[in-house]
Amino acid sequence: GLTEAVDAPQAGVSRDLGTLKETGLLETGGRGQWIYYSLSPQIPSWLVRVLGETASSNGGLIQQAQERLLAMADRPAVRCV
């Protein structure tokens, strides 16, 4: 899933996601074999704005990752936020 989307090794992606979860920036939930990540509702509004601005300034990178996710045959259908 995510390793294919960002074209990065699984170990590095897992480590980075673990760090973000430990710091309270991400929350996780699981369904079957899939783990879903979302921003914690506890993060400050200024950080949400920074992340939004960063995302809008890097649309090409995000679009590439979304296209790779959509191309995955066994990916469950979920809404990208």
Image (cartoon, grey):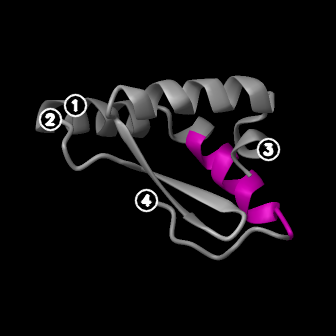
The rendered magenta stretch, by its main secondary structure, is classed as helix
Q: CA distance from mark 2 to mark 3?
A: 30 Å
Regarding mark 4 in the picture, which secondary structure is present there? loop
Disc on res. 47: 1
- Check residue 25 for magenta coloring: no
- Identify the mark nearer the N-term, 4 or 2: 2
- Identify the mark nearer the N-term, 3 or 1: 3
Q: Are marks 4 and 3 in contact (CB under 8 Å)?
A: no
Q: Are marks 1 and 2 in contact (CB under 8 Å)?
A: yes
Q: Which residue is mark 4?
A: 81
What is the quadrant of residue 26 in the picture?
A: top left
Q: Amino acid at mark 3?
A: Glu
Residue 10, placed above or below residue 73: above
Q: Amino acid at mark 2?
A: Pro
Q: Which residue is mark 2?
A: 44
- Identify the mark nearer the N-term, 2 or 3: 3
Q: CA distance from mark 4 to mark 2?
A: 18 Å
Q: Nearer the viewer, mark 4 or mark 2?
A: 2
Q: Amino acid at mark 1?
A: Leu
For residue 51, side relative to residue 21 (left or right): left
Q: Which residue is mark 3?
A: 4
